[in-house]
Every structure is written in structure tokens, then in C-alpha cells.
Image (cartoon, rainbow, N blue to C red):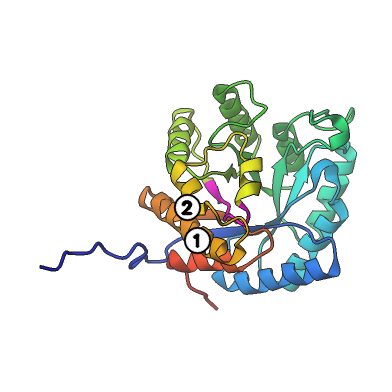
Amino acid sequence: MTAATPAPLFADLPGDISVSFEFFPPKSEKMEEQLWDAITRLAPLRPGFVSVTYGAGGTTRERTHATVARIARETGLTAAAHLTCVGASKDEIAEIADQYWNAGVRHIVALRGDPPPADGGRFMPHPEGYASAADLVAGLKARHDFDISVAAYPEVHPEALSAEADLDNLKRKLDAGATRAITQFFFSTDAYFRFLDKVLAAGISAPILPGIMPVTSFAAIRRMSANTEIPAEMERLFDGLDERPGPRALIAAVAAADLCNRLYAGGVRDFHFYTLNKHEQTYAICHLLGLRPRP
């Protein structure tokens, strides 16, 4: 007797998801070509928005602005600019906000930001600047009616005094005028859903978009995961693949799609992808989830 087999892992997913993509500003002409290739190939998936990051200490300010302005000018995509508190006064941030508004950019990802290495890894507010992301959100909303996204941490920000303090900080950012939160990458669905339970218990009703990071280098993921659980099965899945980029990329796409599929089963319909300016894995994951290009 032939044993019955389960349904295929990604069978008949209706594609009723919404996606958004994060990019970073290019440092060279070659990297710019790669970025625009990724944007062009992912655009037919009709993302709700695409965001462009901001370097530690504001080091990519001009390149971020140029990239966001070009997206807004040359594509039909909604461009979102990352903006941080680091190394800038309130007047400087107001000027940057005005530049984005005048360029037609209406969405800001407001972050406290990573301190520059010269500050020893400790956040030091500018003497005439904003002391926190919540203050930055309030300042931006007072300047223009931006749609603002903020960061959330399912497994707690590394610098937070406690999980409760971290949740209070998220609530302050949303109360200051943010529309949604985007999470740091994670690999445990349990961690995300436990976090959602705490968010709801705290009276927060804003969308909390899961940030999905396809694995391009497992060694790099280990380095970046100081506060992020890496499940044992994931360690086994990528064992021996550090020097085999082709097989690793294929497995990473399926692993990320599986994570999204489990989130989908729990009711999630909005996903934010950290693309690292590459389109192949993100496109494959979206395809596995049933999303297809639309005119």
C-alpha cells in the first residue's frame, strides 16, 4: 500500500499578502547598477513601500536622499527614507525633512540610530538634537504630516533595560504619531507571536510588520544575532554551506519562505524584506508565498 503524502509545503497559497522592501544606498557605480536592477525586478510585486537605510552616525545622508529622491522621481513606488537622531540638530533634521517633503517623499522610517564607532557604541544625543526616536517622530509630525514607521524588537533591543521598558518605548513612538512598526529580523515564529501578545496587552493596535532577513551568510547572521534566537534546526540546515553560496542561497530562500508560511498560518499578511540590494531570494520567497507580478 502506498503511503499518503502531505500536501506540498507551499500548495495553493492565495498570494493575498502585502510586502515592502528595504534597500541601502550604493557606494559605487557597480553597486548602483545592482540596486536598480533589484528595484526594477521587485517592483512588479507591487510593494506597499520601499525604504532606504541611513548609515551609522548619518554617514550616508546624501546618498540616502539621492536614492530615495530617484525612486520617488523615476518609479511608481512609494519611497520611504530612513532618518535617525544621530549627529544632527533639530534644525538640521527639519531641513532634511523639508527636502524629502519637497521631493514628494511622504514616508519616513524614524529611528534613534546606531552611534558612530568614535562614540564607543554608546548613543550620545546631539546637544541640540532629539534624545530618542519618540521625540524624533513627534518632531517630524509637527513639521509635516509624514507617514512614519518605527522599529520594534520581538526579542528586546540589546540596550533596553528590560522587555517592559522596550515595549514602553515602542508605545511612546506610536503614541507620538507613528503609523506602524517594523521588527528587527528574527527566526523564531514563537518569539514574534509572543511579542504580538505583549503588544496587544499593552493596548497597541498599530500594525507590527515582521522583518524577514534571507540568509546570505550564516556567519554574518551569527555576528548580528546578539539578541536573536537562532533555532538549532536552522544551525543544522546551514551547516557546511559557508563556502557554498549557490546551495546556501537556494536553502535560504526556502527557509525564509517557510518562516513566512508559518507566520501566514498565524494570521500575518504583511511582510517586510531586508533585500541587501539583491532581488533573487526575495522574489523567490514572494513567489513561494503565492505573490505574482501585477501590472
28 to the left or right of 52: right
- Residue at horizontal 14%, vertical 68%? 2
Front one among 30 and 266: 30
For the residue pair 255 and 119, the one nearer the viewer reads as 255
Quarter of the image where one finds residue 116: top right
Quadrant including the N terminus: bottom left
Q: Is residue 166 shown to the viewer in this render?
A: yes
Specify the quadrant of the image occupied by residue 223. Answer: top right
Q: What stretch is highlighted in magenta?
A: 209-217
The reply to whether the C-beta atoms of the residues labelled 1 and 2 are less than 8 Å apart is yes
141 over 265 or under it: above or below: above
Q: Judge whether residue 180 is colored magenta.
A: no
Q: Report which residue position mark 1 lands on.
A: 251
* Residue 211, image x, y percentages: 56, 49
Query: Which residue occupies the extreme left position in the image?
Result: 1
List the single residue furthest toward the bottom.
Answer: 295
Residue 280 falls in image quadrant = bottom right
Instruction: Determine the residue located farthest toward the top in the rendered image.
Output: 161
Mark 2 secondary-structure assignment: helix
